[in-house]
Amino acid sequence: MSFGQLRIKGEVYFDEIGTPTAQVKLFKDNKVDQEFETNKKGKFSVMLDAGHDYLFEVSKDYHYTTRFIVSTKLPYVKDQEDFYASFDVILDLIRVYEGLDASIMDNPIMILRNLEEGGFGFDEKHLEAVRSRVENLMDESEKLKSKGAKPLLKPVPVKPKKVIATKPPEPEPKEEVVEKAMEVTPTHAEEKAELTEVRTEKEEAIEKSEVKEEPQNETYEMKLRRERIEKERQRKENLALKRGYETSLIRQVAEESKRMNSSEYEQKKKVKEDSSLYLRENKEQELMAYKSQQAKKKEAEAIVKSENQKQKQQFEKNLIKDVAASRRFAITVKEGSKAVGEETSDGEKFYLKPKIYETTKEDQFKTIRTIHIDYPSNSKQFSVEKYQFGMINYYINQSVVEKETFCKTIKELELTKYQLPCD
């Protein structure tokens, strides 16, 4: 028997600061099931079995952890065997800055489940409930980013935790005190009190002596004073630890910024080198294309020149023939011969063969057939224009003539081997 599966394809957007990838922790039915990282483009893919509730936690340095739920329980699917579906989830991690209220990020911002209408989708009611707070947090983060604020490695609570000292506190390990210091954020009133409050060495010694042990016969006023002094001592200690932590954090951020600037410089240098290489290759390709185009152009010009040379030679050859024929015609006339085509005194005829060629033109209305007769000294043109609806026009040298005239002229040319029918 096979079981249903749901593929989640995630795409996470984040600023290029800290590690190049984001970390994903996957809980299955409230137990850690997988831990993996996205690729450098922020993408990941995971296959989920049907019938379980999954919680995704997507985290990255200098960003708030984003959570979302995927429920693969299939109450609205009749045949749950061999079930398979795929869904894309897009997340935009929000950068951490001091002073932002990010309590909404402690809860899942999306719930993906099998809807009653059919198919997987987001729970719209849940989205409506959290959308405005998430969008406000994102807007505030973007404003601080545009102002050049320095991001924090981890979120810091906006409000300090209250310290209730009903009795002298027991010594605590140093690491736990550091964690408290990280959680405490002093207000403006506390900083003002620290600057304005001046105690003598004697008063501080008295306060320290009062903190060491709780007297047995202590009045209510003395107890309040002792508790107040203990709170003040604890606050100063936490404030000092917090400032040490902030100094260390500033140093770490400066080193990270320096490393990022070096990385950005190397990246820009590589982009510039790649751009130069691309431009050089592009210019080489353009030069090769230009050379190929010029070679083709020269080849075409050579072909045209060859054809022109052939036409010139043929023209000169025909011109020589025409001149020779005209010379024979002139000699014949000079010796007393009659016009072309008429009998001479000895009963012979002289004919000068002209150039004769035919052309035919057609369009959607008519057909024009033409015979051109070219002599060295003159030329004639005979055309018949026939329309589709039956009308026929006759032309001699592009002038309209009667049919009888046209046919008579054509009849006089019967001795030539080209004839134009006179229907």
Image (tube, helix red, strand yellow):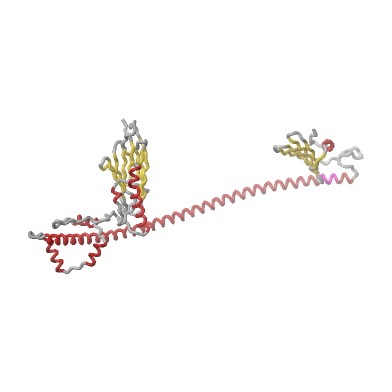
Identify the image quadrant of the N terminus: top left
Q: Quadrant of residue 169?
A: bottom left
Tell me if I can see residue 150 in this picture. yes
Q: Quadrant of residue 228?
A: bottom left
Identify the image quadrant of the C terminus: top right
Image height of 154 relative to 353, above or below: below
Residue at the extreme right? 345
Q: Nearer the viewer, residue 95 or 279?
A: 95
Image height of 354 relative to 78, above or below: below
Point out residue 36 in the picture as x, y percentages from the top left corner.
30, 45
Q: In the image, which residues are magenta?
A: 325-329
Point out residue 389 in the picture as x, y percentages from the top left corner.
74, 34
Residue at the extreme front? 220
Q: Quadrant of residue 174?
A: bottom left
Q: Is residue 6 left or right of residue 187?
A: right
Q: Nearer the viewer, residue 347 or 73?
A: 73
Point out residue 368 in the picture as x, y percentages from the top left corner.
74, 38
Image point 88% across, 45% down: which residue? 333
Q: Does the magenta run of residues contain 370?
A: no
Tell me if I can see residue 24 in this picture. no
Point out residue 54 in the picture as x, y percentages from the top left corner.
29, 41
Q: Nearer the viewer, residue 396 or 313?
A: 396
